[in-house]
Image: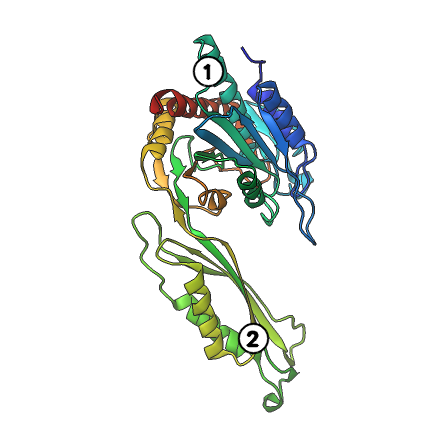
Amino acid sequence: MVAAIEIVELTQSLIKCPSVTPADAGALDVLQGALETLGFVCYRLPFREDNTGTVDNLYARLGSGSPNFCYAGHTDVVPPGDIADWSYAPFEASVKDGLIYGRGAVDMKGAIAAFVVATKKFLDCLSDDNRTLSGSISLLITGDEEGAAINGTKKVLGWLHEHGETLDHCLVGEPTNRAELGDMVKIGRRGSLNAEITVKGVQGHVAYPEAATNPIRGLTTILSALQSHSFDDGTENFQTSNLEVTSVDVGNEATNVIPAYASARLNIRFGDGQDSSSLSHWIRNLCDTYAKDYNLDVRISGEAFLTPPGAFTRIVSSAVEEVSGTMPTLSTSGGTSAARFIKDICPVVEFGLVGRTMHKVDECVSISDLEMLSGVYRSVLERYFLKINK
């Protein structure tokens, strides 16, 4: 029997670390201590690029054989906002009426704790039956998921490749459920493109427009063309691609001045019927058509991807149904996650807590959901190692 690890206490210990991206604040130390108790070999992987803070990451592995089942997640959290708005301090991990309050309770320190406890119980089961792990269990935990994602999962995957580490399948513990635990498993994600368009003009007096060039005309024409475009009707696994303008700015406080520039930012969430290269080309063509002088900055957060339904998705879905009593919907909705990097290495799906309070004031998780999620994760391990691979 391995040492006892309690889910509430571990969740609280993680929440009490104010690990707002890129700070770690001791969160990975807490996790590493729990994993080493279970026999994991842990590697701390700090990465840094110019003009970015150092980000600490963790890769831990139990066993050396194949297959290697990886659990991925992050210990960094978004800022809590105005602490005065919280009913309980965001980094005290207060427990009230069966709920644990704190930033990261749902996204996603609670899920990490649930997997550690699930692993502990799975190892206990093996020990009780005089069996050994037929393969490996690993964790890939980053401190840069809520930020720029420059020094996190992507670089850890590079480190794994350099050191001959192979991942066979991966489960990401992001909050995937909308209403109740068990209602949704993510088997892919839409792509995400961010663009900033700045149209340049010539500043001048509004009474003498012939001596100026108003950049707002060009920008609004571009935005109109962008927003009126119909991308697709969606596909079997992806909803309709969508564009949203998120900001328009001219930096002009005067009423009698034609501004020198006008800028806008936008985001496109796209399915597998689109790709970032063709979308970028389309935006640039519109800018060429409607603006004489402009700057265009396009950044790709990730391409659309899908893990086709098959043996691995059935393992996860069956485990969810067994524990929750609900057969989950397989979905590609929502934002981006670290899965967009991991999908290049191995099949990946996502299942975690109910995301109703994530990133909000009074973020909280129910203890009963934590215990149920841990049960799902344990069932996944049992199905993966004891049923599927026998």
Does 365 sit above or below residue 125? below
**Most foreground residue, 98 or 282:** 282
Packing grade of label 2 (10 A; few <14, some 14-19, many >=20) is: many
| In front of the other: 61 or 255 | 61
Q: Which residue is mark 2?
A: 294
Residue in view at x 55 percent, y 35 percent: 140
Q: Which mark is residue 132?
A: 1
Q: Dot 1: what SS?
A: loop
> Is residue 121 rendered to the left or right of residue 313?
right
**Measured along the vertical axis of the image, is residue 284 above or below residue 1?**
below
Is there CB contact under 8 Å for labels 1 and 2? no
How far from the left and from the top, in percent, is residue 36? Answer: 61, 22
As drawn, is 7 to the left or to the right of 257? left
Image disc number at residue 280: none
Image: 272 above or below 104: below
Up the image or down, 99 lies above or below 247; here it is: above
- As drawn, is 92 to the left or to the right of 5? right
Of 23 and 178, the residue lying toward us: 23
Quadrant of image for the C terminus: top left
How far is the residue under mark 1 from the one under mark 2? 63 Å
The image quarter containing residue 209 is bottom right
Of label 1 and label 2, which has the lower sequence position?
1
Of labels 1 and 2, the one closer to you: 1
Residue shown at 44%/12% (left/top)? Answer: 131
Q: Is residue 212 visible?
A: yes
- Amino acid type, callout 1: Thr
Extreme-left residue of the structure:
236
Residue 111 point in image, percent of width and height: 52, 30
Q: Position of residue 199 (x, y in %)?
A: 56, 75
* SS type, badge 2: strand
Q: Position of residue 285 (x, y in %)?
A: 45, 73
Q: Amino acid at mark 2?
A: Tyr
